[in-house]
Image (spheres, rainbow, N blue to C red):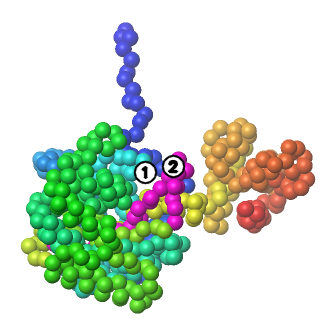
Amino acid sequence: MSDRKTPRPKARLPRGFRDRGAEEIARERAVVEKIRAVYESYGFEPLETPAFEYTDALGKFLPDTDRPNEGVFSLKDDDGQWLSLRYDLTAPLARYVAENFQNLPKPFRRYQVGQVWRNEKPGPGRYREFTQCDADTVGSNSPAADAELLMMLADTLDALGLKGQYAILINNRRVLDGIMDAAKIDASRKGTVLRALDKLDRLGVDGVRQLLGAGRKDESGDFTKGAELSENQIETVLTFPTRKSLAGIEIGAGGQAAYDELVSIRNIVDSTHGEGHIVLDPGVVRGLDYYTGLVFEAQLKFPVKNEKGEEVVFGSVAGGGRYDDLVSRFTGQQVPAVGFSIGVSRLLSALQERAPVALDPLVVVLALDDTARSFAMARELRGAGLRAEAYVGNRKFGDQLKYADKRGAAVAVIEGADERARGEVTLKDLALGAELSKSVESRAAWVKDRPAQISVKRGDLVAEVRKMLARH
């Protein structure tokens, strides 16, 4: 007989991933439904694309080096081809448009809600899996398409209760290209420069200066190689986003035309949404390499606390821009496109204290001696639009009440032989009991003031449960 024990797997989460409970899921669902409602009110229609795409179809627009799964999660299928989990919802859209181009209306307007995955270093509040809500217009190069998406983003944030508490900051990649051309920065380094500038709000000027130079070592000791610009080039690049003005900065004719376009877009939005929503900000860069024109971010104006209760610079909750070359990777034909994404997970962190959302209150029907009747009552309550379940564990009365308490149930429904003989059921107000027990020492006192348990006619079950729930 062998003494060797069967090895057991360790219960643990992969680094950068997390489990989510009922409360957070309920908040996300409420937020996403409000976002969907605004998107659809503008005439955008839903689209779903698969979690996996061929790696070459996604393209290398995240910071990466020479291996296919740097920045993304990848695997080889049985045909020996690389597949990757999508790192955003825009690259799959470009593949979809290229594949179905002849049959789509132009412009094509779609929105998508879904999970995305990034094989990047996790940190506090930064996970490798998160939810995005995207909206895109493909097939129009008009500034009106850009302006409409900015309007829709503003209306969405208003619908989420953030009216007057955010600003949408806009810039143009062609302006940034003009700055880099003036600094004589080699094209092979421009992506690294843009990604460094995109971290300005998080790392500050000194941190970005290191990334523009030799590189930077973070708090954990990990080293990120820099763009290796000269001191003069670094000064030229940093002058623009930190001064918040074009005055005295060489950006070339193309950069000036791009800036004039930004002013035009802002004026269109201000004409319908009032002044103040849109702010021209040279510090907005966006980290993805595929942007070709307008780039923008929505930032909150109020302070946000982190997990430790400390007020932090929260950064953007939404962002996007114009990407006119993404579809042409497949077709060779330029197809103009503009879109944005709301980071739902980040938005939930900011809204948690301001807009708490919970599941509807739960009713638990205890199962004492007739399980079929318990299921019948639970079904009756659900048919009336209430959230109800019948207990399916052991028969001990005390254990059933403990279960209902642990589930956070608001009401327990009890029907034993005595109640059934009288044609009654007992309703126990668990939510009231929990509140009263916090402040009143004597059970007799709080029962006298406001009964937490009543008997009602069986035929009045739904109506009496509604009354009890209405107290809370």
Q: Is residue 371 left or right of residue 116?
A: right
Q: Is residue 289 left or right of residue 329?
A: right
**Amino acid found under the numbered disc labelled 1:** Gly
Is 317 included in the stretch rendered in magenta?
Answer: yes
Which residue corresponds to the image point at 30% horizontal and 71% vertical from the top-left?
A: 282
Q: Which mark is residue 125?
A: 1
Q: Above or below — where is 135 with respect to 273? A: above
In the image shown, does 164 or 58 lie closer to the viewer?
Answer: 164
Q: Is residue 289 visible?
A: yes
Q: Cβ–Cβ below 8 Å for labels 2 and 1?
A: yes
In the image, residue 411 lies at what x, y percent?
Answer: 72, 54
Q: Quadrant of the N terminus?
A: top left
Q: Residues within 10 Å of mark 2 (few under 14, many from 20)?
A: few
Q: Which residues are magenta?
A: 302-327
Secondary structure beneath label 1: loop
Which residue corresponds to the image point at 36% horizontal and 11% vertical from the top-left?
A: 2
Q: Which mark is residue 18?
A: none
Q: Which mark is residue 307?
A: 2
**Amino acid found under the numbered disc labelled 2:** Glu
User: Reading the chain from its start, which is encountered first: label 2 or label 1?
Assistant: 1
Q: Quadrant of the C terminus?
A: bottom right
